[in-house]
Image (cartoon, rainbow, N blue to C red):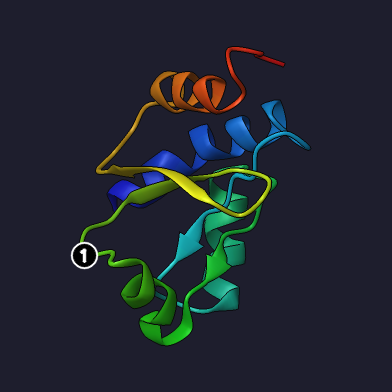
Amino acid sequence: MACIRELPGIDELAQRYAGKVSVLAVMGWGGAAQARSVARAKSIDHLPLLDDGGRFASEMGVDQVPTTFLVRRDGRVVGRIVGIASEGFLRKEADKLLGGQAP
């Protein structure tokens, strides 16, 4: 699955910007055991959140995965990327959120 291939880059981004930008992965399929299995298999530290029943995806208008949201500290969604995004692209977008102040 494309979204699983993207997880290591998202995990790296979460570590790089810890405390500055929130980086969350939301898993719309499977359960807690499968999320832990994916995290172990991909050697990621940030366990994907579960969207049981698809409520989050529905409310956010997600109709394609992966969809990545960039969220400011105040909770405002300031970016939406549909499709696979490289870690470099995500980093550039996060840098824009921080006003060019890379960690």
Q: Identify which residue is drawn at 59% across, 76% down.
A: 32
Neighbourhood count class around disc 1 (C-alpha, 10 Å): few under 14, some 14–19, many 20 upward: few
Instruction: Please give the name of the residue rendered at 47% of the width and 76% of the height, measured from the top-left corner.
Output: 51
Observer-nearest of 70 and 1: 70
Q: Position of residue 56 (x, y in %)?
A: 43, 74
Give, as a three-letter code, the residue at label 1: Asp
Left or right: 83 in relation to 47: left
In the rendered view of the protein, which quadrant contains the C terminus? top right
Q: Is residue 101 above or below residue 38?
A: above
* Quadrant of residue 21 within the rendered picture: top right
Q: At 70% from the left edge and 46% from the top edge, which residue is drawn? A: 45
Tell me the element at label 1.
Answer: loop
Looking at the picture, how far across and down is residue 97, in whole percent? 55, 28
- Tag count in the figure? 1
**Residue furthest bottom as drawn:** 53
Is residue 93 placed above or below 47 in the rendered structure? Answer: above
Residue 74: image location, x then y, percent: 66, 50
Judging by the rendered image, the residue that carries numbered circle 1 is 63
* Residue at figure coordinates x 47%, y 83% from the top left: 52
Quarter of the rendering containing residue 90: top left
Image vertical order of residue 14 relative to residue 48, above or below: above
Horizontally, residue 100 falls left or right of residue 103, namely left
Outermost residue toward the right in this view: 19
Quadrant of the rendered image containing residue 72 = top right
